[in-house]
Amino acid sequence: MERLNTLLAQMQSEDTTLADSVKLYAEAASLMEYCHAALEKTSLQIDEIDAKLAGTVQEES
């Protein structure tokens, strides 16, 4: 997130050229894709844990 914030600040700077903005945007898009994949993986892991816990609770009932 820190790097994304830095990229955003650089893209918003009046001193940043269009060519540099495109490069920064490409890096930001890549980081966002990585973050999305990490969140998706984590979400699946949480779902697995919840399913195991639900099974344990049902077995105890």
Image (spheres, helix red, strand yellow):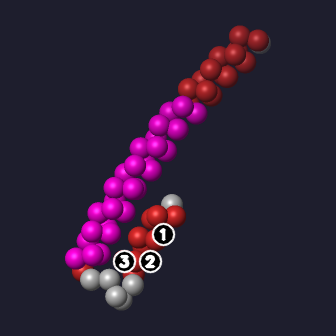
Q: Position of residue 29 (x, y in %)?
A: 34, 59
Question: Tags 3 and 2 in contact by the CB under 8 Å rule?
Answer: yes
| SS type, badge 2 | helix
Question: Tags 1 and 2 in contact by the CB under 8 Å rule?
Answer: yes
Q: Is residue 59 left or right of residue 20?
A: right
Judged by its main secondary structure, the magenta piece is helix
| SS type, badge 1 | helix
Q: Position of residue 21 (x, y in %)?
A: 29, 75
Looking at the image, is mark 3 or mark 1 earlier in the sequence?
1
Q: Amino acid at mark 3?
A: Met
Q: Is residue 44 above or below residue 36?
A: above
Residue drawn at 31 percent across, 67 percent down: 25
Q: Would you identify the image quadrant in which residue 10 lies? A: bottom left
Q: Amino acid at mark 1?
A: Asn
Q: The magenta stretch spans which residues?
A: 19-46
Residue where numbered disc 1 is placed: 5
Q: Distance from label 3 to label 1 (Cα)?
A: 10 Å
Q: Amino acid at mark 2?
A: Ala
Residue where numbered disc 3 is placed: 11
| SS type, badge 3 | helix
Q: How many numbered dots are placed on residues in this image?
A: 3
Q: Would you identify the image quadrant in which residue 20 lies? A: bottom left
Residue where numbered disc 2 is placed: 9
Q: Is residue 43 left or right of residue 15?
A: right
Q: Would you identify the image quadrant in which residue 11 lies? A: bottom left
